[in-house]
Structures are given as structure tokens and as C-alpha cells.
Image (cartoon, helix red, strand yellow):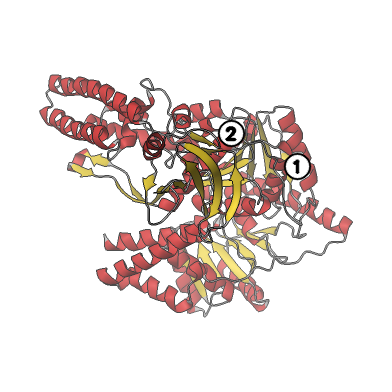
Amino acid sequence: MKTDTSFKIVSSFKPTGDQPEAIEALYNGIQEKKPVQVLLGATGTGKTFTMANIIERVNKPTLILAHNKVLASQLYSDLKEFFPNNRVEYFVSNFDFYQPEAYIPKSDTYIDKSVVMNDEIEMLRTSAINSVLERQDTIIVSSVAAIYGLSDPDEYLKLVYEVRVGEELNRKDFLNHLIESSYKRNNMEITPGCFRVRGDVIEVAAMNGSNNTYIRIDTFGDVVEKIYEVDSLTGEVKHSYQTYPIYPAYDHASSQKRVQRACESIKKELDERIKYFQDEGKPLEAERIELRTKQDIDSLLEFGMCPGIENYSRHIDGRKEGERPFCLLDYFPKDFLLIIDESHQSIPQLKAMFNGDHSRKSTLVEYGFRLPSALDNRPLNFDEFEKLMPPTICMSATPAEYELERAGGEVVEQIIRPTGLVDPSIEVRKTKGQIEDMCEEINKTIANNERVIIVTLTIKMSEDLTSYLKERGYKVVYMHHETKTLERGEILYQLRKGKYDILIGINLLREGLDIPEASLMIILDADKEGFLRSDTSLIQVVGRVARNAHGRVIMYADTVTSSMQRAIDETNRRRDIQLRYNEDNGIVPMTIEKAIVPPIHNSDDEIAETIKLTKSGTKKEIQLKINDLTKQMQKAAAELDFERAATLRDIIIDLQDGLR
């Protein structure tokens, strides 16, 4: 069923700087079957392009893990451009809003699961699974959703229906199979996950095809005469096929027979649980679990679905108690490539998923809201994930202890930036008189029409410093974790435009900030050891001004801690390599030029209006804005602009929080 096609990069770029050496070293490591390799890639050195070249040379199905949806969407967009003729897919959680089911015993508060499903992302998830089952040349960019439960791949494959020209097609059986595979009949409009019947013609918007096409099956009697791929808009025939596999329309699809068998197993567990609660003298819990589970069983038998069906996944899959669930990694062949981007963030996140999920569900089970088998609907624990890991490349500007240890201390470096930009210089100054000294440096930077970023240790400090600098006439703004998504994007936009000269914040300023206009980074309390002043955090902070040719960092501290020294030594080491390369090749570093685009493509007035609504709008006004932004989000998802869609989703959640 697999289609063998080679990966082929389509780009005018060629590997440059130390990219060729990094690509060669990582490729050789995979050929030598090294279990884990580490790419230490400095900010702005083109790690994504290196990633693409490795994928092309290794030529295996590839899973790329990122620690958040926005980073995943950026990688997805970039790789889709590099590999236009191959399958590049996107797999993240399919919720725009998710409030998990929970119970708080102290206040006797039950919180029902509340979700806002995103149909576009659900289609992309299904497309990702179908692509990796169908084609070798598949790249899936995923968040940690990759380790959450999915259907048994073998069961899923049984739902694949192979249509062949010249063979008989039992019309009734085929249409029933489509419905069992979660397709919906729609004779008016053919959209992904739907089918329609017109005389001898059956049209299916299969989930393993393009979002803009559908499959037309022409029959004569019970014999398939032709199979076409048709453009949904123009009706133009794009391809013809002799055989075509139609994959399920839903990534949790299971046959009705399996669901019915599962109901027998659920009933047995229910009887045992009722007896347990009665023996323990807990009649309320016994009644609660009986009513809820019987209602779910009735729904499963009649419709094949029920609210919270995932909590019965152990019974549907036929797994044993405690046995790990199936997940996205099970859909890949044994010989695939795994790349973990920003591994210093992604790996701790992978480790944390299991414990949080188990703690919440244990309470639900204890108080009779769920059967104990619900505990087996879970993400993988890290030991289980490690057992599924194929040859793996971890990428980070600051690789952590785990990946360095797994790689035996070996690191492949990518330090040279194609732009010639070097890491900023770092200077440590005493805290005595730091405010006046800081203001002098700010004045020099503003005189060059460049921006300043100041990192403090606490929210109060950032607010107090902002007030002080405002009193002195500076154009300054602060940003911290309580700053809403919409306001955050607006602040960065106005900083780049020049409405503000100074941005003050805490840990939000470590990663994901792309402000080429910022040339000075000031770190206050640099010697206060801890997470925010670890060597990893300091290196990430320093990297925020690496996109400007005049980038420099001032750390205010009375002592040089071991974390500071490691960060300074590592930055200076990289800087020396970069300067030597520039000198040898006659390169003069130039500040990156990046267009200043308004956040979420709105005008300044629209942005200001939405921010005002979050603070003082009526319920009706906020709801109307939510409806408008939801349409924009769905349109962005349909256009595969997932970075914008993710931003809009966060804004909608902020507005919904205001309503609640």
C-alpha cells in the first residue's frame, strides 16, 4: 500500500557556512545507527534548512516534534515550501478550546469536559495518518499530541477500502463501509470527509487526497469503469487511477463490530466497579458510575459513538490493563527518522504529560465518574516513548543534559549564520549606579534608531522600572505572562514600528522573539541563580539580539555565577568562530531586514478595538467579536496559515475567558 517516492528539495538555496559539515556529520551518524545525535544550532543559522537536507539524504518517513503549535506551524510552512512534491503533514491537538473533565473533592465540584473542535485540524490529523500509511515520502510535523492515544493501526488499516478499475464493487457494502469509516453523505456539497452518489457515479472527498480535490468513481452496473481525481472548484480531471485506497475520515475510526465487542467488556468492568463501591460502603459512587456508564454503552451500541469515547479506548483496542495506548509513532514503519526541535524544551514537555493526565483521571476514577480503564486512555510515559524512538536528531541552541548524555557527549555544531551575523558581545557591570548607567546605554541605542530589551526577575520589578523610565520621558512598555495574546502581538508590532523604544519583561523574552531592530539586551540581577538565570536561559536571552549587527548584552551583577560564566564562555566561543569565518570569507555582517506586519493582519484601529473589548466590552459585543475571529481563524486554517490561526485561537480563548 506504500508509495515509494524520494524526497526532493525545491529551493534556490544551497547549504553554506558550516551547514554542509553539519549535514554530513548527522547523515553519517544515521548511517552508523547512532541512537541519538545532537545538533547544537545557534539562533539564525538555518536549522530548518539543515533539517530538510538531512531528510532528503536519509530518505525515510520523518516525524518532527515541536514543543508548541506555533513552532510546529512555522516548521510545517517552511518544510512544505522545501518539499512541494512530497507529503508534508501537520498533526496537533484538534481543539481550539479544551477544558478537561475534572473533579475537585474539596469543594465537591465536577467540571464537565468542554471543547471547541477545529474541523480543519481534525482533517489535517487524519490526512497525516493516512499519508504515512500510504507513502514513504511523508514528513509529519507534530506537537506532543504525537504521544496521545489513537486507534489500533491494524484496525485502522482494515477500514481502508481499495477500489480497482475492472473489479466488481458492491454498492451497498461500499457505502456502508464509508459510513463506518466516519464519512458523511452530502449530496449538495462535496467537502473533505463527505461522499455523494449520482446515478452510476460515486464521489468521495477522501482524507488521503488533496483538500481541493475529490475522487470520482464511475461504475457500470457493479463494475468500476474509471477512477478520477477531480478539482473541487473547476471540475477539471487532475489524474486517473487504476487503483485507489480510500482511508478513514477520522483518526479514531473503529469498526462497529469492534465497538460492540468492547461494550461487553465495558459491562463486565462496570459490574466489578459497582461491587467494589458497594463493598466499600460508597453507594453514591456506585450509582454515579452505573448511570453514566450504562448511558455511554447505550449510545455506543446505537450510534457507535458516545461523549468521552476515548475513555473506553482500552476496551475498543482490546488492550490489557496498563498496556500502553497506540499513538502516532505506531503508524510509522519501523525504519523512520525522528527529529526533536528545541529539544531542551520539547523533551521535558514529553516527560511531563503522563503525570498530569494520570493525577486528574485518578480523582475521577476514585469518585465514580470514570471506570478504572479510563486511566489507560493517556499519553505515553517517557520510558514508553524511548522504546519507540528510532534514530533521533535533537536540535537546540542550548541542548540539555538528557540529549547530551544519550549522544555520549558528542555534539554536531552549526554556528555560522548565512547572514554573517555574530553572537552579541557580553559585558558584566556592577549593580551600583546601574540605573543611571543603563539610561546612558539606552540613550546611545535610541540615538542609532535601535531598540532595547530589558529582562527583570519579577513582574513587580518590570512594572516599577517601566513607571520609572516613563517618568524620565522614555517610550517604554512591559510584557509578562499575564499579558493577553492580542496585546502581546500588538506590543511587539509597535516596538518594531518605533512607538516604543524599550521593552521590559521576564521569561517571555527568552524564545520566539524576532526583533531585528533590537540591538541592546540588558539583564538585571544576572547573578540570582535559578531557572531564569541558568546558563541555558541566559544563552537564549542573549540570542534575542543576535539578529542585529550591533547586538550587545549588558549583565548587571555583583558576582559572576557559574551559570553566567558558562553562558559567557559559550557565547564568546561561538562569536570567535563566527568572526574568523567572516574574516576568512570577506563577509560584512548586516542586520536582518524583516517586514513589519501588523499582528493577525488587522489595522491598528481594529487591534485597539479588540483590546478594548477584552477589558470593557459588553457580553454581546465580545460574542460578536468571537464569532468574527472564529471565521478568520477557520479561513486561516483553510489557507494553511497555521501561525495566524494559532494566534487567532489564543485571542478567542482570551475573549471567552472574559465572558466567563
User: Which residue occupies the foreground of this view, 47 or 53?
Assistant: 53
In this view, the mark in front (1 or 2): 1
Q: How many marks?
A: 2
**Which quarter of the figure has residue 496?**
bottom right
User: Which residue occupies the foreground of this view, 432 or 138?
Assistant: 138
> At 63% across and 70% down in the image, what residue appears?
595
Q: Position of residue 609 (x, y in %)?
A: 39, 75
**Is any atom of residue 81 visible in this view?**
yes
Is 86 on the left-hand or right-hand side of 456?
right
Find out whether the residues at labels 1 and 2 contact each other: C-beta distance under 8 Å: no
Query: Can you tell which mark lies on residue 23?
Result: 1
Mark 1 neighbour class, 10 Å CA radius: few under 14, some 14 to 19, many 20 or more: many
Real-space CA distance between mark 1 and mark 2, rounded to the nearest whole angstrom = 22 Å
Q: Position of residue 210 (x, y in %)?
A: 54, 50
The amino acid on which the numbered mark 1 sits, given as a three-letter code, is Ile
**Is any atom of residue 535 visible in this view?**
no
User: Which quarter shows the N terminus?
Assistant: top right
Q: Is residue 552 above or below residue 372?
A: below
Query: Can you tell which mark lies on residue 227?
Result: none
The amino acid on which the numbered mark 2 sits, given as a three-letter code, is Tyr
Is 656 on the left-hand or right-hand side of 79?
left
Query: Can you tell which mark lies on residue 402?
Result: 2
- The residue tagged with tag 1: helix, strand or loop? helix
**Which quarter of the figure has residue 379?**
top left
Is 156 on the left-hand or right-hand side of 455?
left
Mark closest to the chain's N terminus, 1 or 2: 1
